[in-house]
Amino acid sequence: MKRILCSLFAVLFLITSAGFAGNAQGAYDADIEKITQNAIDEFLAITKVPRPSYHLSHILDYLTEYAQAHSFECAHDDYGNFWMDIPASAGCENVPKVILQAHMDMVFASERGYEIDPENTGITAIREGNTITADRTSLGADDGIGIGIIMAIITSDVPHGPIRVLITADEEVGLLGADALPAEVLDAEYLINVDNEETNQIICSTAGLFSSDCEKQCSTNDLPDDYEILSFTIDGLRGGHSGVDIDKNRLSAAEVLIRILETAADEKIPFMLGSIDGGTTHNAIAPFAKAVIAVPKVSSERVKEIIEEAADLLRSEYPDENLTVSVSGNTPEGITFISQEDSLDYLSLLSFIPQGVIAMSKKIDGLVQTSSNTGLFSVDNGKCLIGRAIRSCVTEEQDQLHSQLEAKNEELGYSMSVIADYPGWDGDPNTRLIKLISAGFKKATGEETDIVPIHAGLECSWFSRKHEGIQLASIGPRIHNPHTVNETLYVDTIRPCVEAIVYTLGNIGVND
């Protein structure tokens, strides 16, 4: 009887979809609209809470206080993953439990020169019409809006069975929280991951990732008297996510630097690297870089020409970028330089695995199979670093690239530390959960739902390993340019996501 009472909510969906009960449809629309507005409000509140990866004490306190204010039982594990339990609505106690899941951390990026302490200062969100962006920083809609949607649903009057809200830590730096999560927390048949970046789309499968830092401390040298110092800045690039944007013809600042240095090396112009500061994080396409190098005075003008020629050629190859490469005569103080041999070794490792798409899937049209991204690269007082992310939905290819990179590091005397290493998620596009969510999206949009694999990582990969048989799906509203200062959330895509979840919660207990 209790399951029947809860299922009356699903019956209302069927009646209103058939065109009956206009008043009921109007009330339903008003409820969905209210939940959607609450989701936006919750998200805007979250943007004020500092939460870059590895620095999550503020958001963990915020979530704990939220649960306590609503009398939800909550807990967190030693790593910092948080969960709270929402009791079933009256009459729905026997409906299967559903886990609604998002992650609490964000990739922080800011405009060069904009001073902000992301560990202790929230961001400033800007809403203009149908978009929400941030003032000179990334927005953190990935995945703050996921949390906002979940909060709005669990505090609404929507009938539902028992819900566990799971908010994981450090997703953006290798799914570390999901990896550390105790398996017993996943005690449900169904889990909806609210971390997709495209509306009316359900992700059913993801790629694995191996990311690493390659490092070496090189000795520094005095410059020969006949050498000149050149400083140049690479800027104006769009950047983007190293998974979902890797096939969108986006230029990486690492490629620009490689092109300049390789041309100099091909022309037998010796160079010594002094300072390099490039990229923002392993899982973002590098949007900028600064470099200070030293070259023979007799070659100085030719190197300037090489820089200009490389920039012109790359602009023609990447017409959608606003690439600028500016050469400065100003030399920063305190710069030390590594030897020509160490500089060539650094270039060799930087260019060892090509940036971007390495292989496309032969099974699924348009799906990237394997890729590589150099998201961090720096030289500072002789300390050389290259941070790289390798993704693949074919484990053997990912492992092969890992082994090749390991061998190259050993050859050049670099050490390699693993930042993240997680498997892919080989999901089933025909589960009951995916069918329910798809029906919910169709009710909201009138359109068929895309069910897709993606070339990026999701925490579902660890959830599927920790709970064999759990049904998983990933959805979300539209977010463009995540992980960049151009990150944009499209407000009108929040409602379909809300409605898809509400529909699923209302029908999960109904027999097929």
Image (cartoon, rainbow, N blue to C red):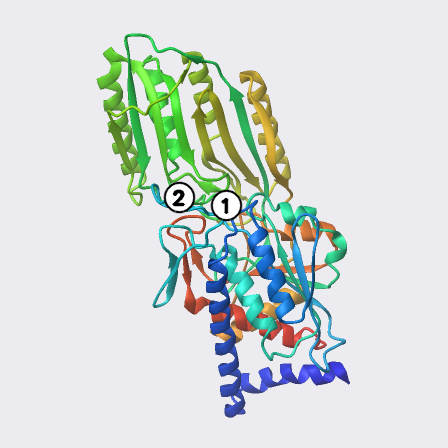
**Considering depth in this image, is 250 or 41 the residue closer to the camera?**
41
Q: Secondary structure at mark 2?
A: loop
Q: Are marks 2 and 1 in contact (CB under 8 Å)?
A: no
Q: Residues within 10 Å of mark 2 (few under 14, many from 20)?
A: many
Left or right, 370 with respect to 177, comes to: left
Q: Residues within 10 Å of mark 1 (few under 14, many from 20)?
A: many
The number of numbered discs placed on residues in the rendered structure image is 2
Image height check: is 88 above or below 314? below
Q: Which residue corresponds to the image point at 68% horizontal and 82% vertical from the top-left?
A: 7
- The residue indicated by pointer 1 is 243
Left or right, 372 with respect to 262, comes to: right
Give the number of the mark in front: 2 or 1.
Answer: 2
* Amino acid type, residue under disc 1 in the picture: Gly
- The residue indicated by pointer 2 is 239
**Considering depth in this image, is 431 or 160 the residue closer to the camera?**
160
Q: Quarter of the image holding residue 501? A: bottom right
Pick out the residue farthest to the top: 225
- Give the image location of residue 256, x and y in percent: 35, 31
* Amino acid type, residue under disc 2 in the picture: Gly
Q: Secondary structure at mark 1?
A: loop
Q: Which mark is residue 23?
A: none
Q: Which residue corresponds to the image point at 70% horizontal and 74% vertical from the top-left?
A: 161
Left or right, 204 with respect to 317, comes to: right
| Quarter of the picture holding the C terminus | bottom right
| Quarter of the picture holding the N terminus | bottom right
Q: Which residue corresponds to the image point at 50% horizontal and 74% vertical from the top-left?
A: 444
- Give the image location of residue 234, x and y in percent: 32, 34
Residue 193 shows in this picture: no
